[in-house]
Amino acid sequence: MEMLKIHAEALASGNIPYHEFLLCYRGTEHIVYGIVEGRQDPCFYRGIIDSMLPDGWEVKLIKAGSKSKVLKVFVDIDWSRFSKQRVCFFVDRDLSDFLGGEKHSGDNLYVTDKYSIDSEIITTKAFERTLEEIYGITDLTPNESEAIRQLFESNLVAFCEAMCPVMAQIILWRRTGADVCLDNIEPKEFFTFASGKIAVKPDYTFPNSRVKQAAVAVNASPSVVADLATTEAEFRAIQGPAKFTRGKYLLWLFAQMANEIHQAAPMFCAKHKAPPKASASIGVANAMAVVAPRARCPASLKQFIEHNYLEFIQRALAA
């Protein structure tokens, strides 16, 4: 009867993810639980967590749909009935560092180090593996590998630098509570590639032109130049370009670079006389699913899993 009461309360509150958690919770089985934001998040978290759990244990991840919904479960859950180390929460940092900080904290609440968990797959190693394992670009000489590595890293820096004014504008919109859909800002509008190298399109050479286009895309007004300059300086002061460029924009860059280098494979690898056969074509929609298994676990996430799930399992096995 007690669990029926909890279910009724969860439904009455409109907290659907909490109700879903209650429906799938099995206290006597070898399962740990996690509540994540979006539909793509399990692509990253499940593989990492599964690889660290002992044989016979599994993780069940519930997709809440948004950061606010994850945090609502975190606040509403009755911790007198569940182990905090067994039930964990995973959210993106987003731009909270510029908006007053995270509103919630806890030992079983993981907040990404960078803008989002998407950002964690944007690494040279993951890119190299993607080219080899998905796009068939293999048998590179050390010099060829180094050339691709340098191109990836220089493109990443150039992209993040060019997106700084746009990120500053997004911060200002967030501070004023403007309801803007960030997915409507498409980086492909600003950039072009030649032989795998990224460049800003001529129409968007000036930072203010990129801000104005972003404002048109989300149907909002651009901020005054002085406020943008101040906010951009604030963004840069805490490594904003490297840490807080929006993850979905970085996914576009990663996918676009992989496709560009694949098409220009003969330029980068003497072995290839034409683009090799690819097992998939990567875009923003599937980048997490394809690339996440090739990304490494951030140290902070590893420590979080050890402190929560693994300690809980150790106690359960010792009982």
Image (spheres, helix red, strand yellow):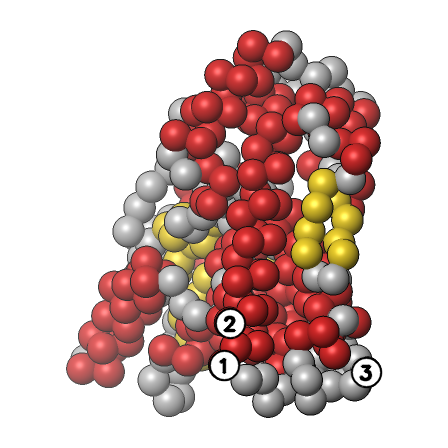
Q: Is residue 12 left or right of residue 216?
A: left
Q: Which mark is residue 76?
A: none
Earlier residue among tags 2 and 3: 2
Relative vertical location of residue 43 with respect to residue 278 in this rendering, above or below? above
Q: Is residue 288 left or right of residue 100?
A: right
Percent from the top left, x then y, of residue 91? Answer: 48, 49
Relative vertical location of residue 210 with respect to residue 87 in this rendering, above or below? above
Earlier residue among tags 1 and 3: 1
118 or 249, nearer to the observer: 249
Identify which residue is drawn at 70% across, 26% down: 206
Percent from the top left, x then y, of residue 214? Answer: 74, 29
**Where is mark 3, residue-wise?**
274
Q: Which mark is residue 146?
A: 2
**Which secondary structure, mark 1?**
helix
**Where is mark 1, residue-wise?**
142
Quarter of the figure with residue 56:
bottom left
The quadrant in which the C terminus is found is bottom left
What type is the residue that disc 1 sits on? Pro
What type is the residue that disc 2 sits on? Glu
